[in-house]
Amino acid sequence: MSLFQRDVTVCVLSSGSAGNCTYVGDKHAGVLIDCGVSTKQILGRLAEVGLADAPIDAVLVTHEHTDHVGAAAVLGRALAKRGRPVPFYMTHGTSRGVHPSCLPDGVEIVEAGTGFRVRHLQIEPIPVPHDTQDPVAYRVNVGDAAVAVITDLGKPTALLARHIRECHALVLEFNHDEDMLMDGPYPYPLKQRIKGNHGHLSNRQAQMLLADGLGGSLRHLMLAHLSEDNNTPTRALVAAQRTLQDGGAFGRVAVSVCLQRAALPPVRVTTNVW
């Protein structure tokens, strides 16, 4: 069996409360994780960063909120016109929760904790605590490289830390600064939902998860799902960089803040594939 190197591309096309979508793949296979912005934006942003011809073999849906699945029905039709129908993977609970107007054709049911393959990509759905029916995060393994997209969760877990430990690239939620949230304009019940165990990760909680899961392979960290009202890029960056410094990884790991209205430049990880 021969061994050869291949670049894995990770591109966060949009991240935030108005829509989420990330591309992970190589030149031979690829997936979108979530599709919460319009199909026009997804395909347009892929083209803008040089990924117009990147393969899309599946869409992995984390949960049923529209900022993660709103474009699914339209995107499914658009991708089918490009060549062949593309399956949308989601848990049974998510499939029940998706609004009928968003539900795509070709739904494939997955179970948290049970891996599956999309061509040569190994996909790991990981359970997360969020206020939806059966939410997951996803880790994508390509050869000996691993990429995880972990957002929309109310607290760190040991299972997530174990999955992060082997990652080369990580998209991780840094949703809110706790002081900004509590001093801000949101109604009190909404503040309680966000900071609850099934809400969203604060900068401090993200630091805890990153510290517990920081491994020697990590090269790219993308701070995701920042609240425009309850966080700032500077606060999130300072928190992440402090954790990397404490863990001896500062300077080794490139850190960027994901954008809502534009794609981040793609990052690439070299992997060995058999």
Image (cartoon, grey):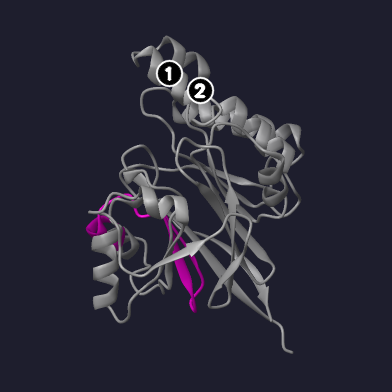
Dot 1 corresponds to which residue? 191
* Residue at far top of view: 183
**The residue stretch that appears in magenta:** 22-43
Q: Helix or strand or loop: what does disc 2 sit on?
A: helix
Residue 172 in the image: state x and y as whole percent. Answer: 55, 42
Residue found at x 28% / y 63% = 75
Residue 113 in the image: state x and y as whole percent. Answer: 63, 56
Q: In what quadrant of the picture does the N terminus appear?
A: bottom right
The alpha-carbon separation of the residues under discs 1 and 2 comes to 6 Å
Q: Is residue 49 magenta?
A: no
Q: Are marks 1 and 2 in contact (CB under 8 Å)?
A: yes
Residue 96: numbered disc? none
Query: In the displayed structure, would residue 242 be above or below residue 78?
Result: above
Residue found at x 45% / y 12% = 182
With 95 as the anchor, is 163 left or right in this view? right
Residue 56 in the image: state x and y as whole percent. Answer: 40, 71
Residue found at x 38% / y 42% = 259
